[in-house]
Each structure stands twice: as C-alpha cells, then as structure tokens.
Image (spheres, rainbow, N blue to C red):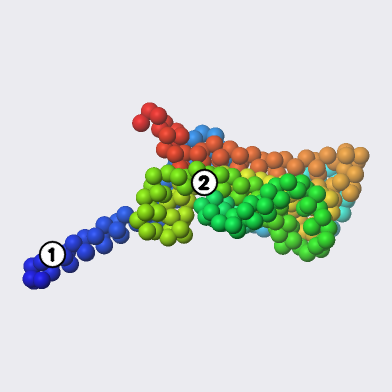
Amino acid sequence: MTTTSRRTTMDASAAAGRTAHLDRPNPLRVLGRGIRTVWAVPKARFGLVLFAFFVLLAIFAPLISPYDPHDTSFGRSQDASAAHWLGTTAAGQDVFSQLICGAQVSVSVALVAGLLSTIIAVAVGLSWGYVRTFWGEGVGFIVNLFLVIPALPLMIVIAAYLQNGGLGVIILVVVVTGWAWGARVLRSQTQSLRSRDFVTAATFSGESATRIVFREILPNMTSLIIASFFGAATAAILAEAGLEFLGLGDSSTVSWGTMLFWAQNSNVLLTGQWILLFAPGLMIALFAVSMSFINFGVDGLSNPRLREGGATR
C-alpha cells in the first residue's frame, strides 16, 4: 500500500469516527427536545407546572413549613386562624405544616415506587416480547398471575405480614403489585415492533439481541414507557394513602396518608373539622391529576405526527 493510499484510508477512518461521534445523540439535548415537545401541548403544560410545584414542595418542605409537623404544643382541635391556617389536629399539631411536610413522603413514595415498577416492567416486557423461548411462557404465567390476583387485597396481605417495616415496606408492596400491567403492555408493543423492517435489518446484520432491544426497539417506546411511569406513580401514591389510611404503614411518619389515618381516628367529620380529610385528599388528587395531564403531551415523543402542530408542519 502506497503512502497516499494509506493516508487516504486514515483520513476516511477519522472522518467516519467524527461522523459517528456527531451522530451520537446528546442526552441533554434529547431531554430538552422532549420537554419542549410535551410543553407544546396546553394540557401537558398545566400538568408539568403542577407536577413541578409538588416536587419543589417536597424538596423545600422543611424551609416552607411554619412549624414542626410533630410539634404537639398547640391547642387541640382548633379551627382555622391566623396562626394555624388549617387549624390543629386532635394531638395539637399544625395541619398546614403537616400538609406541606407530608409531600416529602407521599411524593417520594410515588416517584420511587413508580420508577422501580417501570424498570421491572421494561426489563420483563421487552425481554418477554422479543425473545421466543420456553422461559417466555413461564414469565407470561407469572405476569398473568399477578394480573389476575386483585391488587388491593394482595397489598393488604403483604403489608399486614410485613407491618412496622417503614416506608421501605410500602414501596416494596407497591412495586410487587404494580409492575405486571406495564410489563404486559410493553410486551404487546415489543411484539408489534419486532416484525418491523428496521428490526429485521438489524437482525440480519448480525447485531445482538440486547443491542436490538435497547437501540432499535426501546427508543420507539419512549412515550409508552413514560406513560407507564406516570400510571405507576399515580397508583403508588393512591396505594400509599390507602395502606396508611388502613393503619398498615408507619403511623409515626407524616404523609398525606397518615393525615387521613389520624383524621379518621379522631372522627373529624363528627367534630366539624372536615378540612383534615379534605386537604390531604385534595393534594393526592391534584398530584394524580398533574401526571394524568402530562400524558396528553407524551404521545408526541415517539410519534412526530401526534405532536402539537405536527399536521400543519
């Protein structure tokens, strides 16, 4: 090989390397593009603002809260006043401070349990939908078993057996009972994408199954995975509130669910302090609404035709 041809080969290799480097997507740029896509939908914009409010409330709750939520030095069962905007509990605690600090536990449980449930659902759903082996039938049996068993009674049984385990038990119970639905949906979508031309071309080119699943199939399921996460997070915060309300959680912590538990034990409806039930219930409902509204703009992440103004462009 002559010097000229060698130099030409080296230049071509360097150019190919620069092209591959330029084609590699920037994670921050991809994230910014996704946020802009969701933000373009008015309903999703409202959901993002409301969701960001709850996240910031959970982060800065100790700075915003006027009192210590565990402080029992105030008068018991007081009505709303300038000092206590939502009154006090039967134990003498400030309700407004508990409402703010309760966001830390409730929002954290929703996001962590929703994320873990989604990770399990993605791992099981994609592998189950792409690989055709005998083990797939066993995985399908387990997933269908979790789908057939009623989630709420199963959560109650597991939480009662592992009672007094703290928030870790609540998250574990929610994850164990909440991953199967997402795995079933992702498996159906994976089977649909498996027969597409780009997957067939990647298979004939000799790419491994792992690379095909994570580089070819997974990016086309972004909107479905994000929607699955928000659905799992919504189910998680409702499950946490339900288990705490039934007394199966850690009643010593301050969350929106424990607020409902102590309000029910104090018979607040009979004493006229309905705000102790209404306030945490409203916060749970608004947090669930925020994630539901975000889903209106998530569909455009994987399908440009569904983006706001996409048909016009």
151 horizontally vs 292: left or right: right
Element on which disc 1 rests: helix
Image spot of residue 262 (x, y percent)? 85, 51
- Do we see residue 230 in this rendering? no
Q: Identify the image quadrant of the C terminus.
A: top left
Residue at the spot of label 1: 8
171 vs 149, nearest the viewer: 149
Amino acid of disc 1: Thr
Which residue position is annotated with label 2? 191
Residue 98 location in percent, x, y?
75, 52
Q: Position of residue 108 (x, y in %)?
A: 65, 55
Residue at position x 70%, y 47% in the image: 147
Q: Secondary structure at mark 2?
A: helix
Q: Work out which quarter of the rendered image holds the N terminus and state it.
A: bottom left
Amino acid type, label 2: Gln
Comes first in the chain, label 1 or label 2? 1
**283 vs 73: above or below:** above
Question: Which residue occupies 13% across, 69% down?
Answer: 6
The residue sitting at 78% across, 40% down in the picture is 278
Q: CA distance from mark 1 to mark 2?
A: 44 Å
